Image (cartoon, rainbow, N blue to C red):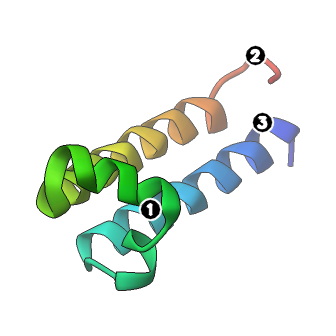
Amino acid sequence: MSSNQIFGIIIALIAMFTFVASSLNLEFFFRNRRAQSFIKIFGRRGTQIFYMALGAFLFYVAYQIYFSEVPV
C-alpha cells in the first residue's frame, strides 16, 4: 500500500466523520469553539449544510489522492 493510498484513506475517514456528525446534528460536534463562530455567521442549519458540503468535498479530495499516480 503506497503513501497516497494511506493518506487518501485517512482523509476519507475524516470526511465521513464530518459528514455524518453534521448530518446527524450531533451536539458535541456543534459545541466546538470553531463551530460556534460559523453558527454566529450562518446559523445552526447553515453551519450544518456547510460542514456537510465540507465533508463531501474532503471525500472527493480523498478519492483523487487515493487514485492519483503522483506522490503526495
Which residue has dot 2 on it?
70
The amino acid type of the residue labelled 2 equals Val
Query: Which of the 4 image quarters holds residue 29?
Result: bottom left
Residue 71 in picture, x, y percent from top left: 82, 21
Label disc, if present, on residue 4 of the rendered structure:
3
Q: Secondary structure at mark 2?
A: loop
Q: How many marks?
A: 3
Residue at left offset 44%, top offset 62%? 18
Tell me if I can see residue 62 in this picture. yes
- Would you say residue 52 is visible in this rendering? no
Instruction: Estimate how packed mark 1 is, as few (under 14), some (14 to 19) or many (20 or more) residues with alpha carbons within 10 Å.
Output: many
Mark 3 is surrounded, within 10 Å at the Cα level, by few (under 14), some (14 to 19) or many (20 or more) other residues, namely some
**Where is residue 40 shown, x and y percent of the image?**
25, 51
The residue drawn where x is 18% and y is 63% is 44
Q: Which residue is mark 1?
A: 18
Residue at 76% in and 16% down: 70
Determine whether, in the image, residue 56 is placed left or right of residue 67.
Answer: left
Question: Which of disc 2 and disc 3 is earlier in sequence?
Answer: 3
* CB under 8 Å between discs 3 and 2: yes
Q: Residue furthest bottom?
A: 27
Q: Looking at the image, which is closer to me, 38 or 61?
A: 38
- SS class of the residue under badge 1? helix
Which amino acid type is marked by label 3?
Asn
